[in-house]
Amino acid sequence: MIVGGADGCRTGWVVCRRDTDGTLDIRVVKTLAEACEGLSILAVDMPIGLTDTPRPGRACESEARALMPGKASSVFPTPCRPALACTTHAEANAISRKLGLGLNQQTFHLFPKMREIDELLRGSRKLWRIVYEAHPELAFTRMNGGKPVLAKKRKPDGFAERLKLLARHGFKWKPIAVSGAARDDVLDAMAVCRTAMQIAEGTATRLGPARERDRYGLPMNIWY
């Protein structure tokens, strides 16, 4: 069984694929549809399933933040569906604010990737059995015995700590340049690939109610 983890990067998606013998293949693809090819499970660091209003928001996000004291801010607030259709931050913020809560610039920058995964899954129900939402910092928290890794991944100490955790759990990587992706993007893809492996094995944990769905039937859960 081949599983994978994907994280958005500046040129598309960086994907870590893990074969049944533990071999890792790290590559950058332009679209998430390409990332899904040949995989039994793909865990993605991007929201799946959107609420119609910004409040109360998705239960899985609140649960994720509660599990990571000191690192809760790494779980970005997901936009409501009406805001996702907007092409400027000002417009998205205005619509979101009108519905109950404003929207920050950082979240808006992720809109193209959020729209991509949303359109992909709404267009193919068979991918619902393959693509799962994950979160790398939750994955690292689990690898670290339930304690969040507080050092920033872009700093040398934070990068090294996460690299060690991955190696300890069977994901060894000698940091090399991956064209089109930052090296911390690769770490995140590897982390959620481990989550994909746990989903495949039946040992992953789901946050949010099992039956919680958005208006299109997409699940609103984070796995780790």
Image: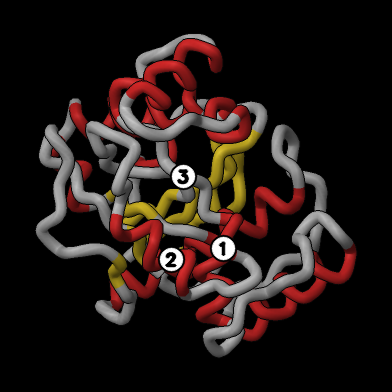
Distance from disc 2 to disc 3, alpha carbons, whole Å, reads 11 Å
Q: Mark 2 points at which residue?
A: 64
Query: In front here: 24 or 137?
Result: 137
Q: What residue type is labelled 3?
A: Pro
Query: In front here: 120 or 179?
Result: 120
| Residue 130 x, y percent position in the rendering | 25, 51
Query: In front here: 186 or 45?
Result: 45
Q: Which residue is drawn at 71% across and 33% down?
A: 180
Instruction: Give neighbour class at mark 1: few <14, some 14-19, many 20+ (Cα, 10 Å).
Output: some
Distance from disc 3 to disc 1, alpha carbons, whole Å, reads 11 Å
Q: Name the residue under label 3.
A: 77
| Residue 11 x, y percent position in the rendering | 64, 27
Q: Does the CB distance between marks 1 and 2 fall below 8 Å?
A: yes
| Residue 31 x, y percent position in the rendering | 46, 28
Q: Name the residue under label 1.
A: 72
Q: Can residue 12 be seen at all in this image of the molecule?
A: no
Left or right placement of residue 106 versus residue 208 in this view:
right
Circle 1 SS class: helix
Sequence-first disc among 1 and 2: 2
Circle 3 SS class: loop
